[in-house]
């Protein structure tokens, strides 16, 4: 992601738009189909731009804050590395982007212009002063078939340099020039290390970890199943790495079920203004098992449920969420395949049962 894009998104993220105002409860019966459809459209747009936060994400963001602060305060030398991994579509990239925006806002302070990055003066040599954008966080996503040259090119492009600038400069110089404090490298699993070029990129990244760490810059790497990636076989990495693994939501234990319900409760609190007939506890108590079974706890499908089910409830005039609205959500192919497999096993498996209600007043 280009630094200017992250800045714009961060400033806009700091001032989220309010939820659309639902019609009064006593006006729902006589509401025309066209007005319901218009409100459904407004709600869909608002939900599509919504980030559904959770205790899990807040805990991980706090760990990221501590990691960066520890590295910043550490004595001179190499710094720790943070690794975020897990299966695909569990919310890793969304979590990292959200944290990056929050950290960016924390560093730039009260700067509120989304179309202009804050700037500072950089002394690049005797009598040479440049005014350059301040970039607290640099967010990189590795493309497939990444080479050393492509990696460096992407880093320079993210800082809004030309596609050939990396040939005339060094990544460490531009990181220091723009006061980059954190480099996030996402989709590391796309780096193929089975050929010589891939191994060279991996060595280049390890070299970068050492070089930027000596200047107090923190590095976070993320990707799917990194515990099986060759980077985790290198003691140069693992002996200074902190690892966080993201798992799907599940109902294997009482703690797991409660975590799932608390997440749904937060989501329900955000959705309720759209649905005047949605009773407290409908989603996080009554429908918690059905929502988990439908989504498999995979964050992408969970979020799809939370975005589409309310829109279906508005369109059919029920103004509350039922299992029919959960079933109407268009989830991923993987989710559909899992559902078919569950049907085939239905005769020999038992259900999860009704979720235990959360404490009153929670």
Image (spheres, rainbow, N blue to C red):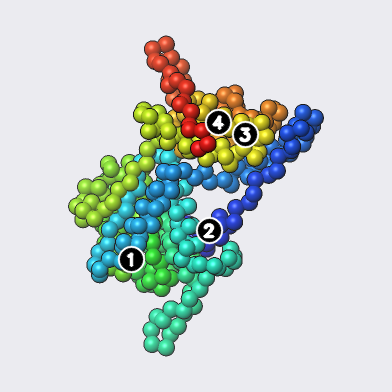
Q: Residues within 10 Å of mark 2 (few under 14, many from 20)?
A: many
Tag 4's secondary structure?
A: loop
Tag 1's secondary structure?
A: helix
Closer to viewer: mark 2 or mark 1: 1
In the displayed structure, would residue 176 be above or below residue 150? below
Task: Give the mark nearest the N terminus, 4 or 1.
Answer: 1
Task: Give the mark nearest the N terminus, 4 or 3.
Answer: 4
What residue is drawn where x is 70% and y is 43%?
Answer: 21
Q: Which residue is mark 4?
A: 281
Front in this rendered view, residue 154 or 13: 13
Q: Are marks 4 and 3 in contact (CB under 8 Å)?
A: no
Distance between the Cα atoms at labels 2 and 1? 22 Å
Front in this rendered view, residue 107 or 115: 107
Closer to viewer: mark 4 or mark 1: 4
Q: Look at the image and tell me whether residue 269 can be seen.
A: yes
Q: Which residue is mark 2?
A: 10
What residue is drawn where x is 43% and y is 18%?
Answer: 351
In the displayed structure, would residue 37 be above or below residue 207? above
Q: Which residue is mark 3?
A: 310
Q: Residue 72, which numbered label?
A: 1
Task: Give the mark nearest the N terminus, 4 or 2.
Answer: 2
Task: Give the mark nearest the N terminus, 1 or 3.
Answer: 1
What residue is drawn where x is 38% and y is 12%?
Answer: 348
């Amino acid at each position: 992601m280009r630094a200017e894009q992250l800045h714009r998104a961060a400033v806009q993220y700091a001032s989220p738009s309010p939820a659309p105002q639902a019609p009064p409860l006593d006006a729902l019966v006589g509401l025309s189909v066209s007005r319901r459809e218009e409100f459904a459209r407004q709600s869909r747009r608002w939900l599509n731009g919504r980030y559904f936060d959770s205790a899990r994400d807040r805990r991980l963001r706090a760990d990221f804050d501590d990691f960066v602060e520890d590295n910043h305060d550490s004595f001179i030398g190499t710094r720790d590395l943070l690794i975020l991994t897990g299966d695909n579509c569990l919310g890793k990239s969304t979590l990292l982007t959200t944290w990056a925006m929050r950290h960016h806002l924390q560093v730039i302070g009260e700067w509120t212009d989304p179309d202009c990055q804050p700037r500072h003066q950089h002394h690049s040599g005797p009598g040479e002063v440049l005014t350059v954008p301040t970039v607290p966080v640099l967010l990189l996503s590795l493309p497939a078939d990444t080479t050393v040259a492509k990696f460096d090119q992407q880093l320079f492009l993210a800082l809004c340099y030309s596609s050939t600038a990396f040939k005339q400069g060094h990544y460490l110089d531009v990181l220091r020039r723009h006061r980059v404090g954190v480099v996030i490298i996402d989709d590391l699993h796309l780096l193929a290390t089975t050929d010589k070029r891939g191994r060279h990129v991996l060595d280049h990244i390890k070299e970068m970890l050492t070089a930027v760490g000596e200047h107090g810059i923190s590095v976070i790497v993320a990707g799917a199943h990194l515990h099986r990636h060759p980077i985790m076989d290198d003691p140069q990495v693992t002996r200074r790495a902190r690892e966080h693994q993201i798992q799907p939501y599940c109902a294997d234990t009482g703690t797991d079920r409660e975590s799932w319900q608390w997440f749904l409760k937060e989501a329900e609190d955000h959705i309720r203004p759209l649905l005047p007939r949605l009773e407290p506890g409908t989603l996080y108590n009554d429908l918690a098992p059905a929502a988990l079974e439908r989504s498999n706890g995979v964050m992408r499908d969970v979020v799809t449920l939370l975005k589409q089910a309310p829109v279906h409830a508005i369109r059919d005039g029920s103004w509350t969420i039922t299992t029919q609205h959960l079933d109407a959500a268009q989830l991923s192919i993987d989710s559909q395949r899992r559902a078919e497999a569950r049907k085939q096993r239905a005769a020999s498996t038992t259900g999860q049962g009704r979720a235990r209600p959360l404490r009153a007043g929670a």
